Image (cartoon, rainbow, N blue to C red):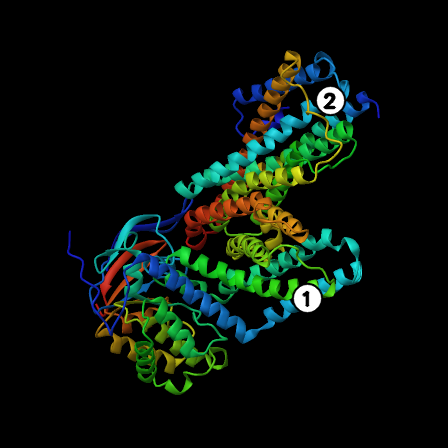
Amino acid sequence: MKPKPQVTKTMEDEVSHNQITNFFNDAWQILLKDLRLELRRKYEIYSIIILALISNLSFGFALGPSNPNVTDFISGMLWVPILFIGMLGFTTGFVREMDRGSIEGLRAAPISPQAILAGKTVYIFLLMCGGAIIIIPSSMAILNYSFHSNGFLVLLVVALGILNIAVIGSIVSALAMYSQSRALIIPALSMPLLPGTIIPSILATGKLAVGADINSILPELQINLAFLLLMIATLWITFEYVLYD
Amino acid sequence: MKTSNLSKSYGDIFAIRDVSIEINQGEIFGLMGPNGAGKSTLIRILSTLTKSSSGEASIFGYNLRKDQRQVKKLIGIVLHHNLLYDELTAKENLSYYLRLYGFRNKETIEKIIFEKTSQFNIVDRVEDQIGTLSSGQRKRFDIIRATIHNPKLLLLDEPFSGLDRQGIAQLKDFFNSTKKNSTILFSTHNQQIGEEVSDRIATLEKGRIIETKTSGD
Amino acid sequence: MTTLELLFTVSAIFWVLIFLYLTWLHRKIMKISKKLNKLKV
Amino acid sequence: MNMFYMIKGENMKKIYPIIIFLVNLAALYMIFLWAPPERTLGDSYRVFFIHTPSAWISYLAFTITFVSSILYLKTRNFKWDLYASSSALLGLLFCIIAIITGAIWAKVAWGLYWNWDPRQTTTLVLMLAYLGYVSFRMAINDKEQRARVSSVLGILAFISIPLSYLSTIIWATIHPMPLIPTSKLQIGVEPAILQTLLTSTFAVTLLFLWMLYITVEMYRTIDTVESVKMENVK
């Protein structure tokens, strides 16, 4: 076997051979780039803010400030706008890279496909968290209700729910890269994948609204966690086939 | 760089079939042939953008399939469209790509960017957003992006198409100047430019190599 | 709705949909084999 | 019936439609006449013999799509892509049948068309998955890309179905519907009922496999027409 020539050191090329740090670094770079891109153009953030406020106002008009049974509507009222913000965020993940052709840059770079997916997922996750941060407090204010259980639990449920949606969002965006009608195909693609995680999240939020402790929402958390692990495992293997032909 | 009967097929249609070529260090290698002969497919496979269906290829001893990460570090790619983000400044684009190619330390990145951009005498434009630049400047930044990590092999897909007289001359000088420390593989359907620029030429027809000759004979 | 009517409607739905699919399939087969013969000749 | 085997033309193929026709006829006979009326629901429960097989087929079809998608990604042989797409198309058909007949069955057994019973909701989610898969394939022109990317979708959608089922069960336990009777049906008790169910399921499965074969042949012919056209163009 011909001896492999060593990669010659060109200008302190600090390549860390450790696989794990590479993964996080690569994902972090892609995330940073997407965030910087987003801050430059901002039109996505504006549309999220508008969408959040519209949905809150409409629910506000529908229910009125001191509606006694507002608590049963809480979970629907929060997750529906978050879901639509996600749907909006899904398109920017990969579709923008494909249109502009910069997807080739990602394919050519010495990074693992999984790192790309991770970077994009966290980007969509942050986008949706931004939406959630706007929606939840403002809807609590407009309809003056509050969660009767400790805030940390609410955060956990919302974060896990959004993370699951973000994972679906990034793979759906990657799939939609190849299709013609991008905006229309994304709901059609994500609809079949969402119920598995949306239902537990809505249920858990509903319970939390009327005051629940950790072990009463345990089944929902377990399902959401199982969903996350299962999705990550599958995507870890299959994503490569989406990116490269 | 060596490939042995490399093929890429979609079902029963072969984009390229049993391509075996060898390029030595510091050579300018031209891929000629009509459109649809498989030039782009071959370049896309060698630049790890697409996977080959069968056959082997190795770059500097690294197998294209097994040691993908090392191969990607050794090659630079220039396509028709530039791989830069319009909303980011040239500096942000270049440092983003440098970090993807494993450079972490801030000063090194600054130094490389300064060096490379001055080489292309486009230093003054570094802080501008790519979207605001002229296509000539964007092309130059894209070439800088492709060579930012000092690749050993530079792959260019139809670099000469759409260039005016002066553009072609500039690109030729660039080829000769980079010839010293890296190899160049490019594709073109323009016979005359191919003959002038490359040391060796391979002609492709319907996915097959029909002729490999040193230019000029 | 007596049970017989009900049973009849349900199996009717089943077979009508299957039949619609088969006719669509048949029309498509006829169309492409015509094209196939034309191309081969 | 000859119109359905004319692609291949061997007479062996002529027998399939006839066999299937007879088996289904026997199944229909058993459903309508032979099976005894059920204690609590009388004769109306016979709808069950038509709903369950089609629901079972829609799940089977989606499993075929799942397996063929994996095999396509492994072997890159377009044959698997053909099976995956044809099976999805048929699965969608049987899924629609299952949902309509299921709704009627729910109306009969529980008095309302849609009672968010975990199975019923999961079948709806399955239909959404099929619709997503089929419309996604229609939106991609490049044959190789379409096959590769829809295979990934076929795999992802498949693993999300059990999760939807699980979460709808949790949902059902929290919002128990007062109308759900003790148990759906005492299938095990009456051997005659079991036999009818088995025959009708067997009959519908045969029908499905034969339709799958014809659909795959049809799409294969479309491919050959396309490649022949490409040859003429070159």
Q: How many marks?
A: 2
Whether residue C1 sits left or right of residue A156 in the image: it is right
User: Is label 2 in a helix, a strand or a loop?
Assistant: helix
Chain at numbered mark 2: D
Q: Which residue lies at the image location 65% right of the left edge and 14% below the top edge?
A: D189
Q: Residue furthest right?
A: C1
> Which residue is found at the position 40% from the left and 60% from the top?
A107
Q: Is residue A155 above or below residue B93?
A: above
**Residue corresponding to mark 1:** A138
Q: Residue furthest bottom?
A: B124
Report the mark closest to the observer, 2 or 1: 1
Residue nearest the viewer, comparing A72 with D62 = A72
Give how far across and how far down residue D218 sits, in percent.
Answer: 56, 36
Q: Which kind of residue does numbered mark 2 sit on?
A: Tyr
Q: Which mark is residue D45?
A: 2
Instruction: Pinpoint the chain carrying mark 1.
Output: A
Residue count near mark 2 (Cα–Cα under 10 Å), binned few <14, some 14–19, many ≥20:
many
Residue D170 rendering spot, x and y as whole percentages: 62, 39
The amino acid type, in three-letter code, at marker 1 is Ser
- Front residue of this view, candidates D134 and B175: D134
Q: Position of residue D175 (x, y in %)?
A: 70, 40
